[in-house]
Amino acid sequence: MDWIAGGAGRLRVETLGGGPGTPVLLVHGGGGDRTHWHAVGPLLATDRNVVTFDQRGYGESDAPADGRRDLVAMAGDVLAVAEAMHLERPALVGHSYGGAVVAETVGRFPDRFSGALFLDAAGSIAGIPPAELADWRASVAPERFRGTARAWFEQILHDARPETRQHVLSTLGLTARETFVASMESLLPYDPTVVRRFPGPKQLVTVRGLDGPLAMRAAVPELPNVFVEDTSHWPHLDQPAEIAGIVRRFLADVDRRRATG
């Protein structure tokens, strides 16, 4: 494991594998950390470098010295990890909130990455009525945050394996309120169509039971999509072999394009 300098503090980074394939950088979701990739990472690392990291304020990484947790700052950290680990135009995989980070990253730095896969990624929440938004903000006040966050995660852990549920609730419990709330607030102005600026291969993976108007698929319907069934919002923990297979097929296409491009 390594420490690298992010935009506003140290970031904890871990590397697996090696080989000629396009390197992959995995970006975890809100309330998580790099350990959410512990089952999928080794399955991808048989022929390429696979890098995971804790986003600012998550896991072992420093809380940002400048207080910034917006998507622009998060995208800058992704680029910093890629450069510090000497990854030549890696592919990105982002889960949930991490999918928004990936979209912002490839939209801002399209020539620095080779592909982008979005795993049950966040879509647009711009249409949330002001009254609902006010209720949500009240529900994550310091005295209510832990109960609210756990109740929300319990809903989207429906169909989760017991091991998944334990893992996800554990990392949620270790996440500072300021980090989690700021991450969710950063999604309010987020426009998933920023990913259209990226000309490289893109792929959605959507949990069918969670598909709907807030999913990335609704915001960018032209993107190729694969549904996964009978899983929670964390399919990479529930069904790592299936998710690794989907990602590997996507990466095979990325590898071909790099070889001919």
Image (tube, rainbow, N blue to C red):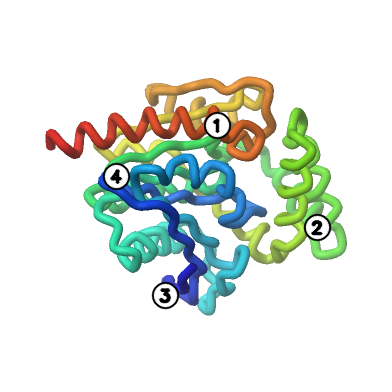
| Mark toward the start of the polypeptide (1 vs 3) | 3
The residues bearing labels 1 and 2 have C-alpha atoms spaced at a distance of 34 Å
* Res 145 label: 2
Under tag 3, what secondary structure?
strand
Question: Do the residues under discs 1 and 2 have CB atoms within 8 angstroms?
Answer: no
Question: Do the residues under discs 1 and 4 have CB atoms within 8 angstroms?
Answer: no
Point out residue 181 in the picture as x, y percentages from the top left corner: 67, 58
Q: Nearer the viewer, mark 1 or mark 2?
A: 1
| Mark toward the start of the polypeptide (1 vs 2) | 2
Judging by the rendered image, the residue that carries numbered circle 3 is 5
Judging by the rendered image, the residue that carries numbered circle 4 is 22
Under tag 4, what secondary structure?
loop
Question: Do the residues under discs 4 and 2 have CB atoms within 8 angstroms?
Answer: no
Position of 202 with respect to 205 (left or right) is left
* Res 241 label: 1
| Mark toward the start of the polypeptide (4 vs 2) | 4
Looking at the rendered structure, the kind of residue marked 1 is Ala
Q: Nearer the viewer, mark 4 or mark 2?
A: 4
Under tag 1, what secondary structure?
helix
Point out residue 61 in the picture as x, y percentages from the top left corner: 56, 70
* Res 117 label: none
